[in-house]
Image: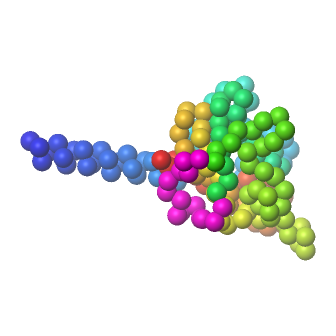
Amino acid sequence: MRLKLFILAAAVFSVTTMQAQEEKKQFNLNAADGIVYYDLETNQPVAKTNKAWDISFSKTAIQLNSAEGKVEAQLVSGTNFDKLTKAPTTGFKKDSAGSSAIQSGSGNGWYSYNMEDHTIQPIADRVIVVKTTEGKIVKLAITSYYKDQKDFNPGGYYNFKYSFIK
């Protein structure tokens, strides 16, 4: 009986762990023409009136639903998406009237601007870690800023991947 319970518990743990690390992807989220509000739990853009939105995108700016949803985030530098398996215990910030938790500007946040060819490129060793409206932790990496993930295509089309972590 104990062996059966142990096997069952191990199977449940294994499935839960796999679900927690399941990678989700978003392609060509158009934030070039206005603000797009996104619910990480459902992996869908939503209306601003939907209070479950976690993160918004507008051109190169990223904002959080800190006022209504109590969302917090931070930019983790020096690691890549795959190697980040646990959330930081400190350093989370909320957006406020005067500042964003995820800074904007070349080299300050998630991207760098190449002055020679005028492209915006995600910085490879920067991961955005978000505490969602539901209280879950998400790691998110922007993979491209261009439509169909091709440089010199129209910009403002977010392509990113994310997964829930502990």
Res 115 seen here = yes
Q: Is residue 52 magenta?
A: no
Res 44 seen here = no
Q: Residue at x 73, y 45 (%)?
A: 101
Q: Position of residue 116 (x, y in %)?
A: 90, 74
Q: Is residue 82 magenta?
A: yes
- Rendered position, 149 above or below 163: below
Give left or right: position of 22 versus 119. left
Give left or right: position of 160 versus 136. right
Query: Which coloring applies here?
Result: rainbow
Q: Quadrant of residue 76?
A: bottom right
Quarter of the N terminus within the rendering: top left
Chief SS of the magenta region: loop
Q: Residue at x 56, y 51 (%)?
A: 88
Give left or right: position of 88 versus 26. left
Q: Which residues are magenta?
A: 77-90
Q: Position of residue 96 (x, y in %)?
A: 78, 36
State the residue lying farthest toward the left: 1
- Rendered position, 123 above or below 70: below
- Rendered position, 32 above or below 119: above
Q: Residue at x 19, y 48 (%)?
A: 7
Q: Position of residue 4 (x, y in %)?
A: 14, 45
State the residue lying farthest toward the bottom: 116
Q: Position of residue 133 (x, y in %)?
A: 60, 33
Q: Residue at x 48, y 47 (%)?
A: 166
Give left or right: position of 43 versus 151. left
Total marks in image: 0
